[in-house]
Image (cartoon, rainbow, N blue to C red):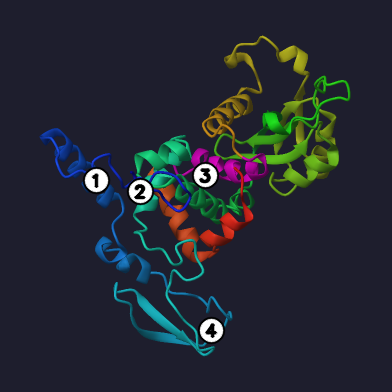
């Protein structure tokens, strides 16, 4: 009988032959290689050599009281620097971060992030890296926490292309008319996503459901586009306040005039292309909780924008995790979330 994880799913570390006393040469080979691969993906902190990385980040304040009166207080058994605060609490550089209380190496995050950056679903990643699905999902939420501020770090400048696109709610969340028919047109069954790009950086932001409004467009992009930039967009009236308040040079096109144009002839192609690639990314996570839409879009923002090298994006995640610490405990997440 294969061992089950706490979630009731089959543990990724097991093989069909773990309880067998007599194995064929093929079975022995497969079991040994599989377990070697699992062990390599799940190295203990003490074996990972990452203490130097962790110790390179000096805490700015005590994660418990916020005080600055703390001192070095020896090393842990893994060689990680321990600190003692005047509040009598001890901590290490990972305390209060997404790596808090981690028993496995931070190096596991490298492959995890790289898979997500390549549009691999968390279910596929859990198989590839031999993590439980619950662990992969939990890590995704911690990554979302780390990336919460990423849209606020981007200001679009010079020439900006802007347009809205829509993504449907999950089938079980669709609202119907009283007669059982589907709502027509742009309705509350469609999540509106504002997308804007200056060809260097691109923003993907949830604006709400249904049709756009001047108020919501202004709230979404008013502080994310440099004043006096050139805005290339359709003739959506929801953009009027944005254009007026930021004194944008507005170049607009009627949507009906753009239909059927080749990409090279379509003045909105840069933003249309961003729409298409974004939906491919979201579709790789089919069935995801739409309440987490902005988390997925923040992740895609990291994927889409500079730097281009994927490992440099992983570097940004790790630096952010230490310099803007946020923590989500496993039990707290799963006590609060019973569905996906």
Q: Is residue 112 left or right of residue 323?
A: left
Residue topped by disc 3:
302
| Disc assigned to residue 68 | 4
Q: Pointers 1 and 2 in contact (CB under 8 A)?
A: yes
Q: Main secondary structure of the magenta part?
A: helix
Q: Pointers 2 and 4 in contact (CB under 8 A)?
A: no
Q: In terms of image quadrants, where is residue 79?
A: bottom left
Tell me the SS state at disc 3: helix
Q: Earlier in the sequence, mark 4 or mark 1?
A: 1
Residue topped by disc 1:
18
- Mark 4 or 1, closer to the camera: 1
Q: Is residue 7 left or right of residue 48?
A: right
Instruction: Report the front residue among 286 and 17.
Output: 17
Q: Kindly give the residue lying farthest to the right in the view shown.
A: 178
Task: Categorize mark 1 by other alpha carbons within 10 Å: few (<14), some (14-19), many (20+).
Answer: some
Q: Please, is residue 202 above or below residue 108 in the view?
A: above
Q: Earlier in the sequence, mark 3 or mark 2?
A: 2
Q: Earlier in the sequence, mark 3 or mark 4?
A: 4
Q: Position of residue 15 (x, y in %)?
A: 28, 42
Q: Please, is residue 100 above or below residue 185 in the view?
A: below
Q: Is residue 74 left or right of residue 85?
A: left
């Amino acid at each position: 009988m294969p061992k089950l994880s706490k979630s009731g799913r089959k543990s990724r570390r097991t093989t069909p032959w773990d309880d067998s006393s007599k194995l064929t040469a093929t079975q022995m080979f497969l079991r040994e290689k599989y377990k070697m691969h699992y062990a390599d993906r799940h190295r203990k902190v003490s074996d990972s050599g990452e203490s130097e990385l962790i110790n390179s980040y000096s805490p700015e304040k005590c994660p418990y009281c916020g005080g600055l009166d703390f001192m070095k207080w020896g090393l842990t058994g893994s060689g990680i620097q321990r600190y003692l605060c005047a509040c009598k609490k001890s901590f290490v550089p990972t305390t209060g971060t997404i790596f808090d209380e981690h028993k496995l190496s931070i190096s596991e995050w490298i492959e995890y992030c790289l898979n997500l950056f390549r549009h691999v679903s968390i279910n596929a990643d859990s198989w590839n890296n031999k993590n439980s699905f619950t662990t992969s999902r939990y890590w995704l939420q911690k990554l979302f926490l780390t990336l919460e501020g990423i849209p606020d770090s981007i200001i679009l400048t010079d020439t900006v292309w802007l347009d809205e696109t829509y993504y449907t709610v999950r089938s079980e969340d669709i609202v119907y008319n009283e007669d059982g028919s589907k709502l027509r047109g742009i309705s509350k069954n469609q999540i509106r996503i504002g997308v804007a790009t200056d060809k260097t950086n691109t923003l993907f932001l949830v604006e709400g459901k249904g049709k756009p409004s001047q108020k919501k467009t202004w709230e979404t992009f008013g502080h994310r586009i440099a004043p006096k930039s050139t805005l290339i967009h359709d003739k959506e009236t929801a953009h009027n306040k944005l254009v007026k308040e930021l004194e944008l040079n507005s170049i607009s096109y009627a949507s009906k005039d753009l239909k059927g144009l080749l990409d090279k002839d379509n003045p909105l192609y840069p933003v249309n292309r961003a729409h298409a690639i974004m939906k491919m990314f979201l579709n790789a996570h089919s069935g995801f909780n739409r309440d987490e839409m902005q988390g997925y879009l923040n992740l895609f923002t990291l994927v889409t924008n500079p730097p281009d090298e994927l490992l440099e994006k992983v570097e940004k995640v790790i630096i952010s995790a230490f310099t803007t610490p946020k923590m989500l405990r496993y039990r707290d997440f799963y006590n609060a979330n019973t569905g996906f």
